[in-house]
Amino acid sequence: MYKIKIRVVSVRGHCAANLKVGDIFEIDNNGQPVPVQFCGWAFVTLWPFITPLRYGGTLPWEKDPNKAYVSCPDPENTVVFEISRTPDDTPFESDKQAF
């Protein structure tokens, strides 16, 4: 199993959940976002991409097998996320945490 980090890379419009470029979230061992103040609509959209990366799968359309780029479903105020994975025994770098 891999550690998963989600980073906000773009916000087009105004995110109602107040997500900002650079916000970082990790997925814990139970598959939950940390910190928990994550947009539910975005999380439901990201989950199908998190799961294969978390368990060693790849997404054939992505250039980097360890990353995926996904946007939230709001067409007027779109947030784009980078999902990245690292081996489970690799500590995350100390990035700026959201909230």
Image (spheres, helix red, strand yellow):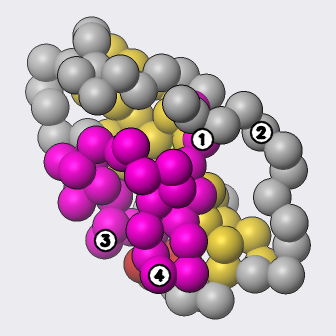
**C-alpha distance separating marks 4 and 1:** 18 Å
Q: Amino acid at mark 1?
A: Ile
Q: Nearer the viewer, mark 2 or mark 4?
A: 4
Q: Of the residues under marks 1 and 2, which one precedes in the sequence?
A: 1
Magenta residues? 23-50
- Mark 1 and mark 2 in contact? Answer it, CB < 8 Å: yes
Of residues 14 and 9, the one nearer the viewer is 14
Q: Of the residues under marks 3 and 4, which one precedes in the sequence?
A: 4
| x 30%, y 55%: residue | 43
**C-alpha distance separating marks 1 and 2:** 7 Å
| Residue 25 position in % (x across, y down) | 55, 49
Classify 86 as above or below 74: below
| Residue 45 position in % (x across, y down) | 24, 56
- Mark 3 and mark 1 in contact? Answer it, CB < 8 Å: no
**C-alpha distance separating marks 2 and 4:** 21 Å
Q: Is residue 60 visible?
A: no
Q: Amino acid at mark 4?
A: Asn
- Tag 1: Cα neighbours inside 10 Å, few (<14), some, or many (≥20)? many
| Residue 89 position in % (x across, y down) | 85, 81
Split into 4 quadrants, where in the image is the N terminus? Answer: bottom right
Mark 1 lies on residue:
24
| x 28%, y 21%: residue | 15
Q: Of the residues under marks 4 and 1, which one precedes in the sequence?
A: 1
Q: Nearer the viewer, mark 3 or mark 4?
A: 4
Mark 3 lies on residue:
48
Mark 4 lies on residue:
30
Of residues 20 and 12, the one nearer the viewer is 20
